[in-house]
Image (cartoon, rainbow, N blue to C red):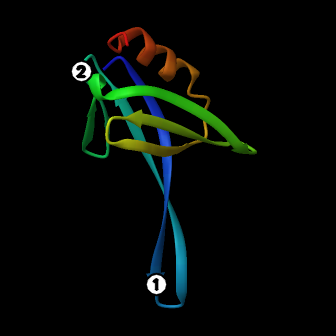
Amino acid sequence: MLARQRYVRMERVLNGSGMDTVVLELDLLLDREAITAEGRSFLLKDVYDISYRIVGGQLGILYLHTSSGVYPFNVEEDPAAFILAFKQTAPRR
């Protein structure tokens, strides 16, 4: 593993008295071949770019731009180190 970026996913869960919001903390993992998130792998050759936008407070959205679409990930920590590791590892375009 070359880099790790924590991201969060919110899920709405039905309980006996209504709905609850559950916050799951997960990791994007970068290795020499792929970026993996929740068991899904994006081969580096298929990832065109990674961008980041702050949306308010401590929350931002990291975007994986891939050959099959753009995938957003909610992040609470600055992903600059993860993005730099990707740019140093990914095949040149």
Asked if residue 44 is positioned above or below residue 85 in the image, the reply reads below
Residue 34 image point, x, y percent: 27, 26
Binning the other alpha carbons within 10 Å of mark 1 as few (below 14), some (14 to 19) or many (20 upward) gives few
In the depicted structure, whether residue 2 falls above or below residue 24: above
Question: Could you tell me the amino acid type at mark 1?
Answer: Asn
Relative to residue 5, is residue 33 drawn left or right?
Answer: left
Helix, strand or loop status at disc 2 = loop
Mark 1 or 2, nearer chain start: 1
Residue sitting farthest toward the bottom: 17
State the image quarter where residue 2 is shown: top left
Q: Residues within 10 Å of mark 2 (few under 14, many from 20)?
A: some
Which mark lies nearer to you, 1 or 2?
2
Classify residue 56 as left or right of residue 49: right
Residue farthest right in this picture: 57
Residue 13, position in %: x, y?
45, 75
Q: Residue at x 49, y 44 (%)?
A: 73
Write the residue at 37% across / 13% down. Answer: 93
Q: Is residue 88 above or below residue 9?
A: above
For the residue labelled by badge 1, is the local secondary structure a helix, a strand or a loop? strand
Task: Say left or right for 60 vs 90.
Answer: right
Residue drawn at x 35%, y 30% as measured from the top left: 29
- Residue nearest the viewer, comparing 18 with 91: 91
Counting from the top left corner in percent of width and height, residue 68 is at 32, 42
Q: Which residue, given by chain and number where applicable, does mark 1 sit on?
A: 15
Q: Which mark is residue 48?
A: none
Q: CA distance from mark 1 to mark 2?
A: 41 Å
Residue picked out by circle 2:
33
Q: What amino acid type is highlighted by mark number 2?
A: Glu
Q: Position of residue 76 (x, y in %)?
A: 61, 40
